[in-house]
Image (cartoon, grey):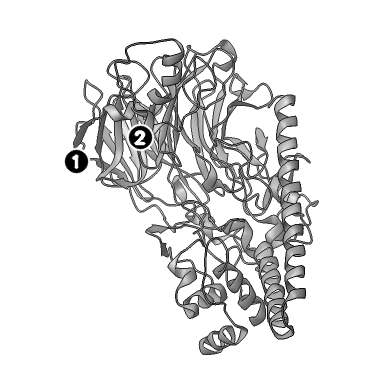
Amino acid sequence: MKIMKNSSLKNGALAAGLLLFLAASCNDNPKNANSESAGIDSTAAENNTQLTLPEGFSATVFAEDLGEPRHLAVGESGKVFVKLNSVDDGNGILILSDEDNDGQADEKQGFADYGGTGIAINGNKLYASSNSAVFSYDLDEEGMPANMEQPDTIISGLIDRRQHNSKSIALDNSGNIYVNIGAYSNACQEQDRTKGSPGQRPCPILDSAGGIWRFRADKLRQTYDGNSRFATGLRNVVGLDWNTKNNQLFVLQHGRDQLHGMFPDMYSEEESAELPAETMYALNEGDDAGWPYIYYDQNKNKKILAPEYGGDGEKTGAPEAIDPVVAFPGHMAPNALLFYTGDMFPAKYQNGAFIAFHGSWNRAPEPQKGFFLAFVPFENGRPSGEWEIFADGFAGAETVESPGDAEHRPTGLAQGPDGSLYVSDDAGGTVFKITY
Amino acid sequence: MNNFRKLLLTAAVFAAISACKNSSENNEEEQIQLHEETPTTQKNVQNEENVKFAEGKGIYTQYCVTCHQANGSGVPNLNPPLQETQYVLGDKERLIGIVLNGANEGLEVKGKTYSNSMPPFNYLKDEEIAAVLSYVRNNFGNEAEPVTAEEVKAVRENEE
């Protein structure tokens, strides 16, 4: 374990606030803000970040220079656990603490010798995933992992063929843990992403990937088979969460790529930039969302037969597959889902869904989209209104040509014990904290 | 997004597109003027190179741009960059081989690996592969010897 008392964590955010301090003729800056590490533009007096938020909300840079933070989780103690995509300085998980409660972390510690995406807290247990396994830790009275160096391996041997290999996790209240195993393919063609290569039927990938698998959260050394599969026909899910209002798992699928690239005569570049939908599903055990045989067209509101399987952009398919509960424009990459159960935010937001859109790449040569947080209001475990942009401005530019140009890309979401919302960003290495 | 911001965005995109169009038109004009002043043999060579460059750019836009992006930056963690990498600037045979056979081994590029598979483009003609690789090797900040159709042919035959 490494402990780094890190006052520089605060510098970037403070530098952005420096102008405000000066404008207010503030004589004493107790934190010695360093103007060299700016990069954060102030857009509102109560908001020391570049984010644009609905009225009454504010944001701070909770921590920065963290490497590539993927998902994150906040314990009852208020400690923020950040899963890093790859091991950085010997650490795959960071613990951030804000001891003086000023909205900026003042202590950073690290542990875990594996990179990955998934992390979650349930009761006094912390769960985290590599790209092939899931580990658990016992949290002590201070909310710290007691067995940092010796985690329990609860699941191993999950398929990792690089493409769509992140293993996102969510827990229910009955002792189960749900793990996404993404399909190592775009559309299950005989040759992946190859023009003219036919789709395979049945798709052989689906026996061990392209779905959600369910395991026991307290059982050691589980492996997986068809029996533990919870839902199938999901190309790749990065964001998922358990809805406690109706006790149901909700997932966000990354829709397929390259409709124009594979079928230029059927789809224009513009159509291919918007299609297919990124979809939110409410899952029941045994559900099939239809990948790779269909995709969802958010304009037609239909499941359209994939062109690799004889589709022409119009024909529908897979009538037995479930329909999404929300359909977003294509390629924006929903990387996190959080049902808000706090009471800090106004009533509108309570029990609703926050979604972190990582931002697109597959829209090129059209400008990229996403790079924001969306919100969907919910009532009784079902969407009760249209989706809207909740927080924008992460990219730092109005038009993003290439995702590498985005300053920040929202990747993970977590709720603090006081109801604040934490957002991780794997491009800029930042964690933002949003409060009301 | 409110209407005012939409309007601003639309105006910005429109301005950007017009700027692009203007600059490419200007470039063409400059090139034409340049040719008129050059001796015949040089002019032919220059013309041939321009045609090849345009052909390479067209192939790049059709087959490569989605994954590797218009500026050759690739996509973090998914698709590797083409900007100043050894895979692009180095051994031509290796580069030609990647285009012919694709790559799905998680090659390390500038210290990072990328998770998407690249499909084989063996259905492109030797001339087309030569043109797109010459374009890639001399764009995005790259500067390296062009690739010829003969070199592509040799790699293809060697593999068969």
Q: Residues within 10 Å of mark 2 (few under 14, many from 20)?
A: many
Taking depth in this image into account, of A13 and A19 the one nearest to the observer is A19
Residue type, numbered disc 2: Val
Q: Nearer the viewer, mark 1 or mark 2?
A: 2
Secondary structure category for the residue under label 2: strand
The percent position of residue A82, horizontal first and vertical second, equals 35, 34
User: Looking at the image, is A257 positioned above or below residue B150?
Assistant: above
Secondary structure category for the residue under label 1: loop
The percent position of residue A161, horizontal first and vertical second, equals 44, 59
User: Looking at the image, is A130 positioned above or below residue B129?
Assistant: above
Taking depth in this image into account, of B18 and A146 the one nearest to the observer is B18
Which part of the image, by quadrant, shows the N terminus of chain B?
top right
Which part of the image, by quadrant, shows the C terminus of chain B?
bottom right
Q: Is residue A47 left or right of residue A223?
A: right
User: Looking at the image, is B46 positioned above or below residue A305?
Assistant: below
Kindly identify which numbered label has been placed on residue A149. Answer: 1
Q: Residues within 10 Å of mark 1 (few under 14, many from 20)?
A: few
Q: CA distance from mark 1 to mark 2?
A: 17 Å
The percent position of residue A58, horizontal first and vertical second, equals 50, 17
Residue type, numbered disc 1: Glu
The percent position of residue A280, horizontal first and vertical second, equals 60, 36
Examine the rendering and report whether any part of residue A219 can be seen: no
Chain containing the residue with disc 2: A
Residue denoted by label 2: A82
Return the disc, 1 or 2, that comes first in the chain's sequence: 2
Q: Is residue A198 left or right of residue A56?
A: right
